[in-house]
Image (cartoon, rainbow, N blue to C red):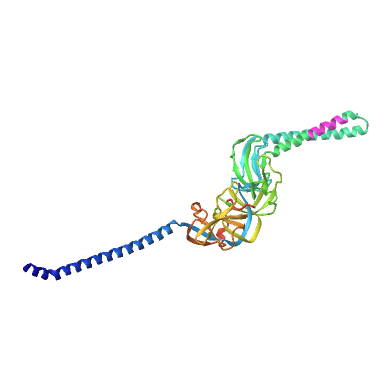
């Protein structure tokens, strides 16, 4: 009877325990459900992140219109149009050297005076002989008129007189060689003697360079023979003065193509007398055609394929490999004749990781604007005719 009473009294406690167990189970299930929802969200975020990371980052630029020039570029040293190695035409001691290096001289100006004592004596001796024979010949003519002298003797005297005159002219010429004169006008580039030195005959003693006109000679491939003509403008940069352009013209074109190298010579002329000097290394650019409104893309957008030229065009979030027909190349720009439309975005950086249909992430958008800085430096491969 006591036991029954105890069971009867324990009923509410058991029911409370069951209720607590049910509540704990519900909470556990609820927490599990919440945890499962958070895990799904994290999975979705990770998947989206992985999808973004699969996109290849690239830089792009827009196809635009600008003026473009067809040019030929090359490099060549500057040379003086005229240069002379002054040599001594006679031997002797240099009594006076009248010029220094860097000095301007005129044609005919005396540069060096050599010892001329021996030449003066020889000129005087031949002059005396000549005067004596002139007098003898004058008397012989009078005697010949009176028939007192044979024609043979008169001819001999005439021959002797002509020989004496020639000897005197030669001696006078040798005497003039004692004064070394400048054959051309220009600048004394070098001087190899000093006052008091003995000068050997035919030895070079002074070098004169005419810097009023400077020339640069390009060896141009024969395919450009029809495009490069005399009178075309030339732009030049020199290594000695970077960033400072010089303007000249095509002075002459040698139309004969060298069979060995397949090139012909184009001589470009520049005004000298200023900062330009012979021996400077020049980078030249000859513009032979211009287009004022050409469709262009940056040259960096062109793919390095050996086949037909192509670019990667961004369409949506992916790229397409588009073959293009090229026109002129002008420094950093390439003219597009077909394949790309105005305003389309082409990849200029990150091309090596791309394939047809690759998804890309645009880092920037570069409009192809016209700027003075876009003009290429002469001497770099700036333009070709396609």
**Range drawn in magenta:** 154-165
Residue 193 drawn above or below residue 43: above
Which residue is drawn at the image coordinates 38% and 61% (left, top)?
Answer: 44
Picture quadrant where residue 38 is located: bottom left
Residue closer to the observer: 62 or 210:
62
Residue closer to the observer: 281 or 62:
62
Question: Residue 315: in sight, yes or no?
Answer: yes
Question: Residue 328: in sight, yes or no?
Answer: no
Which residue is drawn at the image coordinates 51% and 56% (left, top)?
Answer: 357
Residue closer to the observer: 227 or 30:
30
Q: Where is residue 266 in the image (x, y as percent from the top left)?
A: 67, 48
From the image, give the main secondary structure of the stretch colored magenta.
Answer: helix
Which residue is drawn at the image coordinates 89% and 28% (left, top)?
Answer: 152
Question: Which residue appears farthest toward the left when viewing the image?
Answer: 2
Q: Please check the rendered image and state whether residue 177 is part of the magenta-colored stretch, yes or no.
A: no
Question: Which residue appears farthest toward the front when viewing the image?
Answer: 1
Picture quadrant where residue 52 is located: bottom left
Q: Where is residue 383 in the image (x, y as percent from the top left)?
A: 61, 53
Residue 367 drawn above or below residue 229: below
Q: Please check the rendered image and state whether residue 164 is part of the magenta-colored stretch, yes or no.
A: yes
Q: Where is residue 167 in the image (x, y as percent from the top left)?
A: 76, 33
Name the quarter where the N terminus is drawn.
bottom left
């Amino acid at each position: 009877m006591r036991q029954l009473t105890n069971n009867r009294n324990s009923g509410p406690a058991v029911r409370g325990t069951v209720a607590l167990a049910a509540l704990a189970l519900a909470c556990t299930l609820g927490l599990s459900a919440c945890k499962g929802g958070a895990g799904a969200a994290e999975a979705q975020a990770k998947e989206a992140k992985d999808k973004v990371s699969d996109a290849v980052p690239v830089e792009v630029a827009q196809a635009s219109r600008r003026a473009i020039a067809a040019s030929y570029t090359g490099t060549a040293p500057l040379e003086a149009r005229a240069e002379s190695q002054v040599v001594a035409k006679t031997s002797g001691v240099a009594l006076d050297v009248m010029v220094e290096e860097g000095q301007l001289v005129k044609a005919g100006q005396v540069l060096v005076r050599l010892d001329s004592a021996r030449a003066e004596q020889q000129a005087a001796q031949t002059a005396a002989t000549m005067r004596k024979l002139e007098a003898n010949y004058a008397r012989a003519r009078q005697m010949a008129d009176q028939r007192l002298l044979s024609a043979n003797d008169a001819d001999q005297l005439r021959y002797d007189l002509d020989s004496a005159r020639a000897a005197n002219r030669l001696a006078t010429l040798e005497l003039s060689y004692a004064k070394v004169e400048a054959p051309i006008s220009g600048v004394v580039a070098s001087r190899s003697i000093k006052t008091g030195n003995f000068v050997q005959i035919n030895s070079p003693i002074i070098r004169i360079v005419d810097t009023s006109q400077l020339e640069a000679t390009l060896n141009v491939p024969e395919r450009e023979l029809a495009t490069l003509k005399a009178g075309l403008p030339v732009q030049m940069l020199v290594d000695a003065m970077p960033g400072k352009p010089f303007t000249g013209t095509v002075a002459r074109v040698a139309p004969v193509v060298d069979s060995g190298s397949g090139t012909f010579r184009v001589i470009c002329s520049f005004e000298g007398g200023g900062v330009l000097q012979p021996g400077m290394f020049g980078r030249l650019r000859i513009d032979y055609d211009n287009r004022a409104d050409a469709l262009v893309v940056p040259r960096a957008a062109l793919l390095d394929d050996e086949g037909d030229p192509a670019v990667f065009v961004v369409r949506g979030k992916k790229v397409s490999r588009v073959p293009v027909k090229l026109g002129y190349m002008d420094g950093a720009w390439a003219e597009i004749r077909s394949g790309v439309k105005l305003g389309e975005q082409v990849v200029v950086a990150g091309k090596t990781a791309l394939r047809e249909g690759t998804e890309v992430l645009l880092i920037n958008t570069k409009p192809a604007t016209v700027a003075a800085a876009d003009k290429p430096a002469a001497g770099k491969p700036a333009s070709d005719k396609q």
